[in-house]
Amino acid sequence: MINSMTGFASYEHKSEFGSFIWEIRSVNQRFLEQYFKLPDEFRSIESSTRDIVKQELERGKVECTLKFNPNIDTETVHFNEKLAKQLVANAEKVNSFLTDKSVARFNPIEILMWPGVINSGNADDDQVKNAAIEAFKTTIIKLKEARQREGEKLLTILLDKLEKIESEVALVKTHLPNILAWQKEKIETAFKDLNLSLNPERLEQEIILIAQRIDVAEELDRLNSHVSETRSILNKGGSCGRRLDFMMQEFNRESNTLASKSINVDVTNSAIELKVLIEQMREQIQNIE
């Protein structure tokens, strides 16, 4: 099974601590890139969640967002009394330096608002973070399933394009015998129009040279070989995007050579159609993991 790099998954996990809502989006990218948007109290789990992504995904730009709605009855307020006393003592010392005693002394509310004096959190911080990580594991599985579904669609498209490439190759092969006969007749007609005599041996030599110059049997065989190899890669599945991209380069090389050797409008049209099909495949392959 092949996997797309494009996918989306959303998962809400309700626990005794509150509701965890994970959203993960992924799009195509040459390598694996991760971006996390987490509440401040969950920053410490980013390393663990990054490791999970690395274990489950090979390529893609992955954006992960966590929203946490805590249960009110599990919230506790922690008062850092030691820090508050230090702040008060320092404030009193600053006040002693003031010559104008009419200046208001410090406001207790400002002490409470100082970072670290009041902390709101759950009774068991580790359990809350572990619950968030478990919810993330479920979400990443859902993302993989979404990418697999997209991969199935891509597989159908690519197999259809391969069949059309085979059809064009077969069509070109049917034209090859007629091309030489057409070229021979064209030469004979040209000589007749000019009232010139044509040496049969010379004619045969010219036809042989033309046949060598326009011989595309090797290119057609390679195209069929590339079709078989691409099918094999798709059937094997897994992380095969880079290999498929390389195959598209090989397809392009043969189709370009076919076009350059063409002296017949039918073969030229087939070469153009092949290039269109290959480009369509290449666009789809950019989304494969």
Image (cartoon, helix red, strand yellow):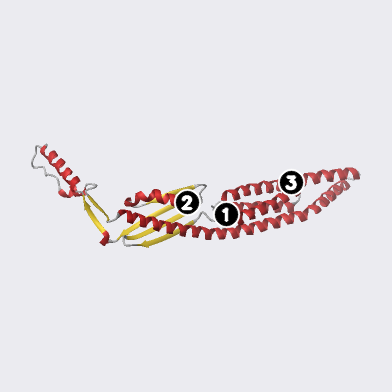
Amino acid type, callout 2:
Gln
**What residue is disc 3 on?**
261
**What residue is disc 2 on?**
55
Residue 199 x, y percent position in the rendering: 91, 43
Query: Viewer-nearest of labels 3 and 2?
Result: 2
Residue 124 x, y percent position in the rendering: 29, 55
Image marks 2 and 1: residues in contact by CB distance under 8 Å? no
Closer to the chain start, of discs 3 and 2, is: 2
Q: Are there few (<14), some (14-19), or many (20+) residues within 10 Å of tag 2?
A: few
| Location of the N terminus (image quadrant) | bottom right
Q: Is residue 124 left or right of residue 213?
A: left
Question: Is residue 262 visible in this depiction of the protein?
Answer: no
Amino acid type, callout 3:
Lys
Above or below residue 166? Residue 208 is above
**Marks 2 and 1, how far apart in space?**
25 Å
Q: Are there few (<14), some (14-19), or many (20+) residues within 10 Å of tag 1?
A: some
Q: Secondary structure at mark 2?
A: helix
Q: Are there few (<14), some (14-19), or many (20+) residues within 10 Å of tag 3?
A: some
Closer to the chain start, of discs 2 and 1, is: 2
**Marks 3 and 1, how far apart in space?**
29 Å
Residue closest to the far left:
101
Q: Residue at x 50, y 55 (%)?
A: 6
Q: Secondary structure at mark 3?
A: helix
Q: Which label is found at residue 284?
A: 1
Amino acid type, callout 1:
Gln
Image quarter of residue 22: bottom left
Image marks 3 and 2: residues in contact by CB distance under 8 Å? no
